[in-house]
Amino acid sequence: MKILVINGVNLNLTGKREKGVYGVETLESICAELKEFARKHGHEVDCVQSNIEGEICTFLHGAEGKYDGVVLNAGAYTHYSYAIRDAIASVPTPVVEVHMSNVHAREEFRHKSVLTEVCKGEILGFGKNSYKLALESFWL
Ligand code: DQA
């Protein structure tokens, strides 16, 4: 299987920002680990990141026919981006929503995701392993 991992706004700063919440490992290092994890299981992962809402939509549009699935951590866009929600609903490629932190144990505005309803499923609270569990959900 070929899976696209999309990271959204501020996730480029993973390893540098709010280390107590998101850990000290950089996004680059996490993505390298995800690629290796997928390779060991006979699958392929591409990783992209953008801070721009429309660019994330374009990544989702481009996934159709090219990837078997998408793992998406949209960052704070999760909580209010109807554009990303509509992009997910517009393509047949299944999308699994991911969060490193347990958003339900944090501020109230993080308790609501406008994306979950149009996603195949959601995995959250397991740090970088949230991404691995989401990848596994495609091939298990
Ligand atoms: C996050 C949770 C979001 O609420 C937050 O805005 C992020 C990261 C997570 O991975 O836990 O940027 O998606």
Image (cartoon, grey):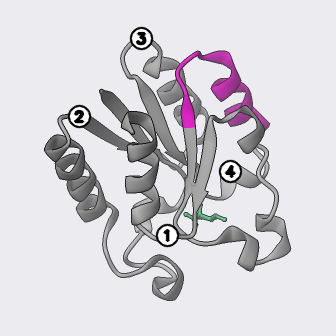
Q: Residue at x 79, y 45 (%)?
A: 114
Q: Position of residue 81 (x, y in %)?
A: 75, 43
Dot 2 or dot 1: first in sequence order is 2
Left of 16 or right of it: where is 99? right
Q: Quadrant of ligand 1?
A: bottom right
Marks 4/2: CA–CA distance: 26 Å
Dot 4 or dot 3: first in sequence order is 3
Q: Check if mark 2's residue and mark 1's residue have beta carbons within 8 Å.
A: no
| Residue bearing the label numbered 4 | 77
In the picture, the disc for residue 44 is 2
Q: Please name the predominant secondary structure of the magenta segment in the image.
A: helix
Dot 1 or dot 3: first in sequence order is 3
Dot 4 or dot 1: first in sequence order is 4
Point out the stretch of residues depicted in magenta: 82-95
Q: Residue at x 55, y 41 (%)?
A: 96
Left of 83 or right of it: where is 124? left
Question: Which marked residue is nearer to the observer: mark 4 or mark 1?
Answer: 1
Dot 3 alpha-carbon crowd within 10 angstroms: few under 14, some 14 to 19, many 20 or more: few
Q: Check if mark 4's residue and mark 3's residue have beta carbons within 8 Å.
A: no
Q: Identify whether 125 is placed above or below 66.
A: below
Q: Nearer the viewer, residue 137 or 16?
A: 137
Name the kind of residue labelled 3 in the image: Gly
Q: Residue at x 72, y 32 (%)?
A: 118
In the picture, the disc for residue 126 is 1
Q: Tag 2, which secondary structure? A: strand
Q: Identify whether 78 is placed above or below 101.
A: above
Name the kind of residue labelled 1 in the image: Phe
Question: Which marked residue is nearer to the observer: mark 4 or mark 2?
Answer: 2
